[in-house]
Image (cartoon, helix red, strand yellow):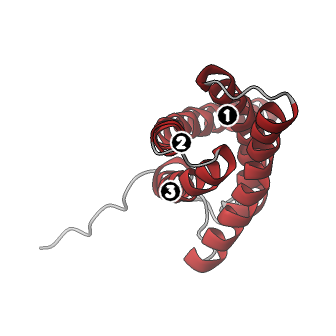
Amino acid sequence: MTFVKRLYRWFATMIHELTKFGIVGALAFVLDTGMFNLLNLVLGMGPLTSKVLTAAVSISFAYAGNRFWTFRHREQSGLGREYFLFFLLNGVALLFGLLVIGFTTYTLKLTDPLSVNIANIVGVGLGTLFRFWSYKRWVFLEATEPIPVELPEAKQRR
C-alpha cells in the first residue's frame, strides 16, 4: 500500500505542478508574443533582436510566477543561485527559439508575420519542454524535509 500512496502523491504533485507551470507559461507566452510582434512587426526591429529583448522580460515574469507560485512548496536554495540558474537554463531554451526563428527567416526566407509567429511558437514549445525538466532538476529542488500542509495549532492560553 505504501507504493500506491507514494505513486498517488507523486502523480498528484506532478499534475499540480504541470497545471501551475502551464498557467505561468501561458501568461509569459502572451507577454513574449505580444512584445515580439510589437518590436518586430510594428517597430521594425529584427526578429532575433526582438526575441532576445522579449525573452528577458518574459523570463523575469516566469521566474517570479514559478518561484512564488508553481514551485513554492519546494526548497529555496537562495534567490541568487536560483535566479542565475533560471536565467542560464532559459538562455539555453532561448537558443531553441532563436534557431527556429533564424532558420525560418534567413534560410527559408519566410519573413511574413504568420511564418515568423509560427516559428516563434515552435521555438517556445521546444524550449518549454526543456525548461520544465531543467527547473525541476536544477532550480527548484525537492524539499529535504516535508513541508507541513497545515499550520501548527496555537498553544491554548489559560
State the image coordinates of residue 60 (x, y, percent, origin top left). 52, 60
Choose the circle earlier in sequence order: 2 or 1. 2
User: Which residue is painted at 68% across and 37% down in the image?
Assistant: 124
Dividing the picture into quadrants, the one containing residue 144 is bottom right
- Give the amino acid type for the residue marked by disc 1 in the picture: Asn
- Packing grade of label 3 (10 A; few <14, some 14-19, many >=20) is some
Q: What element carries label 2?
A: helix
Relative to 26, residue 147 above or below: below
Choose the circle earlier in sequence order: 2 or 3. 2
Camera-side mark, 1 or 3: 1
Question: Which residue lies under the disc numbered 1?
Answer: 120
How many badges with numbers are in the image? 3
User: Which residue is painted at 72% across and 30% down in the image?
Assistant: 119
Label pair 2/1, CB-CB below 8 angstroms? yes
State the image coordinates of residue 81 (x, y, percent, origin top left). 66, 76
Q: Which residue sits furthest left? A: 158
User: Which residue is painted at 82% across and 43% down in the image?
Assistant: 99
Determine which of the numbered discs, if any, sits on residue 36 in the image.
2
Dividing the picture into quadrants, the one containing residue 153 is bottom left
Choose the circle earlier in sequence order: 1 or 3. 3
State the image coordinates of residue 86 (x, y, percent, origin top left). 66, 63
